[in-house]
Amino acid sequence: MRIVLLGAPGAGKGTHCKKIVERFGLQHLSSGDILRQERTKGTELGKKAQSFMDSGGLVPDQIVVDMMVSAIKQASTKGFVLDGFPRTVNQARQLDESLTKAGRQIDVILNLIVDDGMVVARITGRRSCPKCGAVYHIANMKPKKDGICDKCGSNLVQRPDDTEKVVENRLKNYYDQTAPVVDYYKANNTVYDVDANGKPEDIAAEMFNMLEGLPAEQKRRS
Ligand code: AMP
């Protein structure tokens, strides 16, 4: 299965992607995670992306498209879940063109819908592990020991783009540039809207039911 997970920042894309990939044996391809890894490694790509990311803006399309097309080519043949990509209609078009050339297509699009107030609370309370990428929340997903990653023991940090000031810009960018991607897909594909305001386990259960109930041709492996 090749899945795209859409939704505003803080809608829970990362959390739910992890659950979906575990359940269905797919690969998680997060454009945000790959960009952060490039920054940590200090690559040219990472340096180019840095200022856009810190201000809550979008990294230019061509940089992200080249990076993700290359990640998709190396992905497991079982399939993948795209998280944070595509984020503009231009990116979605280029992704479709690249997949079509390879005789492939996106099988399922899940659109996580969440209230703006929830987005701000979720993002500003988020704490991340800079070493292993694990994600926590100061109120509803606390680590066992305050400020310390359960998985690798590193000190947790607030991502520079998770502050209240930057979140506003990220939300604006979402409505201006990413929300139209939902309409782009709705024109030619089935998009499953998922209410993502509730408890993570209930949302995951709804998504699993939906994915397990898909017709066989949408679950086809390449
Ligand atoms: P995320 O972890 O998905 O919230 O992404 C963090 C930041 O990386 C975003 O605020 C953007 O600056 C950048 N980014 C991630 N994915 C994309 C994308 N598909 N297009 C442009 N910028 C992106």
Image (cartoon, grey):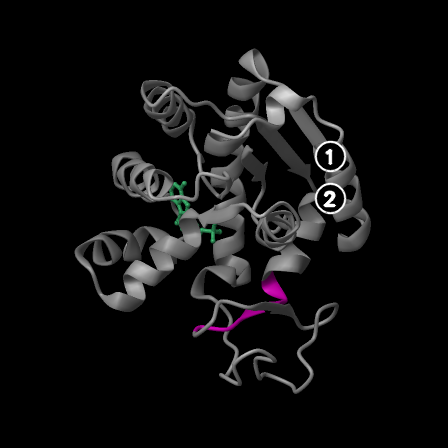
Q: Within the image, what quadrant is residue 171 found in?
A: top right
- Position of residue 173 relative to residue 28, above or below, is above
Query: For the point 79% across and 40% down, which residue is it?
Result: 206
Graded by Cα atoms within 10 Å as few (under 14), some (14 to 19) or many (20 or more), the crowding at tag 1 reads few
Read off the magenta span.
Answer: 124-130
Please provide percent x and percent y for residue 120.
63, 55
Quarter where residue 216 is shown = top right
Tell me the tag on residue 196: 2
Is 46 placed above or below 185 here?
below
Let me know if residue 102 appears in the view: yes
Total marks drawn? 2
Please give the label number shown on residue 45.
none
Position of residue 180 in the picture relative to residue 92 (left or right): right
Relative placement, left or right, of 79 versus 12 is: left
Q: Amino acid at mark 1?
A: Glu
Task: Looking at the picture, tell me which residue is in the foreground, 180 or 92.
Answer: 92
The x and y percentages for residue 5 are 57, 38
Which residue is more in the foreground, 69 or 112? 69
Image position of 23 (left or right of 156)? right
Residue 197 visible in the snapshot: no
For the point 42% across and 25% down, the residue is: 89
Residue 128 on the magenta segment: yes
Please report whichever mark, 2 or 1, sits nearer to the chain's N-terminal start. Answer: 2
Q: Which mark is residue 212?
A: 1
Q: Amino acid at mark 2?
A: Ala
Q: Position of residue 82 (x, y in %)?
A: 49, 40
